[in-house]
Image: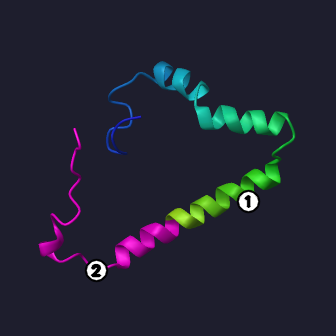
Amino acid sequence: MGHSMSDPGNYRTRAEIEKYQERDPIKLFTQSLMETGVLDDKRLKEIEDRVHAEVEHAAQFADESPLPDPKELYTHVYANPL
């Protein structure tokens, strides 16, 4: 995929995208769980719905949260230990 929805196909051909989608580890793991009977369509839908709700909740929380005080800009700077 591209970096955002504004450039979805600027970096890879459709064939290349499809090739890598076939190797998608989440897709392959899901297929494996379904083939072995560990997961079925109903349970997969429940998981996908729960994940979607959690992402929506997180986005809503972020949208509704106040902006941090500018003094906090460098409060949590990552320090590379090397």
Q: Sequence order check: which comes first, mark 2 or mark 1? A: 1
Q: CA distance from mark 2 to mark 1?
A: 32 Å
Q: Amino acid at mark 1?
A: Glu
Residue type, mark 2 in image: Pro
Q: Residue 29: give its label.
A: none
Q: Where is 5 relative to 61, above or below? A: above
The picture places residue 37, in percent across and down from the top left corner, at 87, 40
- The residue singled out by tag 2 in the image is 66
Number of other residues with Cα within 10 Å of mark 1, as a class: few under 14, some 14 to 19, many 20 or more: few
Is 6 on the left-hand or right-hand side of 74? right
Which residue is found at the position 12% from the left and 74% from the top?
71
Q: Which residues are magenta?
A: 56-82
Q: Where does the N terminus fall, quadrant-wise?
A: top left
User: Percent from the top left, x then y, of residue 36?
Assistant: 85, 35
Total numbered labels: 2
Element carrying mark 1: helix
* Disc 1 target residue: 46
Which one is in front, 63 or 36?
36
In the image, farthest residue toward the front: 81
Mark 2 Cα-neighbour bin, 10 Å: few <14, some 14–19, many ≥20: few
